[in-house]
């Protein structure tokens, strides 16, 4: 079985509304229902576009009515240095501190009549404590992250893996989440994306459909665990080149 999932990162009131609308229109054209990560209380100065006062009441509500899957994308999207030399909103914090961030983020979204069913951390940066907090909260059905060919179980949580950001024809089997950052997508990248989608449309599915098709209680095999160091190295190099945390 081969399935592709689209994930959109960094939705917030100060997002690049024009670019988000371009991607939304593209997905509507091919009837693709993505996973969209919303920052509950954005405090990241990276997003400097004009604030949309109708973000929660109109934009998010429209996505929900279309059947998009809503994810909580961290809390403030603000990083601190880690002992490993990287940056994270969660790594290095104890259980109580991480629980406070995740619970406050969830409460903030619910206050806007938006209940997320998934979680993923900014910059693919989380640790075992993060997963424990997410599982213990009981709020989320799955985490959108990790490295594998198919969704897998770890620490009592379901993971939908994310190996590559942009669409690639990789293997003739597997479940792949393609991650987009609409705030910074270019017209050129959108054109390439549409070409790929038009050619492989039959493989794009909403997560809700994929969850009905696959075995959800599955552990990663050794080769999937082995790809982790390589993917991590590639992502760290890309972050340094781009000067961003994604």
Image (cartoon, helix red, strand yellow):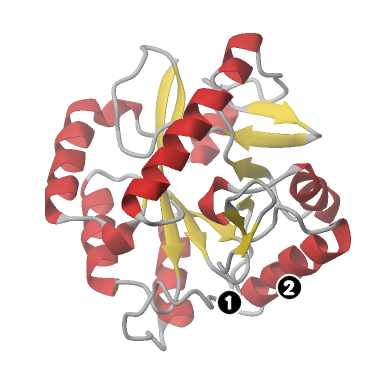
Residue 112 visible? The answer is yes
Residue 137 lies, with reference to residue 58, above or below; the image says above
Residue 39 placement, left or right of 29: right
Q: Position of residue 30 (x, y in %)?
A: 24, 43
Q: Nearer the viewer, residue 129 or 13?
A: 129
Q: Nearer the viewer, residue 109 or 246?
A: 246
- The answer to whether marks 2 and 1 mark residues whose Cβ atoms lie closer than 8 Å is yes
Q: CA distance from mark 2 to mark 1?
A: 9 Å
- Identify the residue shown where x is 75% and y is 54%: 92
Residue 178 lies, with reference to residue 1, above or below; the image says below
The mark total stands at 2
**Residue receiving disc 2:** 104
- Identify the residue shown where x is 78% and y is 59%: 93
**Residue receiving disc 1:** 41
Mark 2, secondary structure of its residue:
helix
Q: Position of residue 58 (x, y in %)?
A: 41, 78
Q: Nearer the viewer, residue 126 or 160?
A: 126
Residue 113 placement, left or right of 194: right
Label 1 Cα crowd, 10 Å radius (few <14 / some 14-19 / many 20+): some
Residue 48 placement, left or right of 57: left
């Amino acid at each position: 079985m081969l399935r592709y999932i689209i994930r959109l990162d960094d939705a917030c009131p100060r997002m690049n509304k024009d670019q988000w609308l371009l991607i939304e229109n593209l997905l509507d054209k091919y009837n693709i229902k993505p996973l969209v990560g919303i920052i509950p209380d954005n405090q990241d100065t990276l997003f400097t576009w004009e604030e949309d006062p109708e973000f929660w009441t109109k934009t998010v509500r429209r996505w929900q009515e279309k059947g998009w899957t809503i994810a909580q994308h961290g809390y403030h999207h603000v990083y601190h240095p880690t002992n490993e030399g990287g940056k994270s909103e969660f790594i290095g914090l104890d259980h109580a501190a991480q629980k406070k961030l995740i619970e406050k983020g969830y409460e903030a979204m619910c206050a806007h009549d938006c209940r997320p069913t998934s979680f993923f951390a900014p910059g693919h940066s989380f640790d075992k404590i993060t997963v424990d907090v997410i599982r213990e909260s009981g709020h989320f059905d799955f985490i959108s992250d990790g490295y594998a060919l198919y969704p897998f179980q770890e620490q009592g949580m379901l993971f939908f893996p994310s190996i590559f950001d942009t669409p690639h024809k990789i293997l003739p089997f597997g479940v792949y989440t393609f991650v987009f950052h609409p705030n910074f997508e270019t017209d050129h990248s959108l054109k390439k994306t549409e070409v790929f989608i038009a050619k492989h449309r039959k493989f794009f599915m909403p997560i809700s459909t994929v969850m009905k098709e696959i075995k959800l209680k599955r552990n990663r095999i050794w080769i999937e665990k082995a790809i982790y160091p390589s993917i991590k190295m590639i992502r760290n190099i890309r972050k340094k080149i781009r000067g961003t945390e994604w």
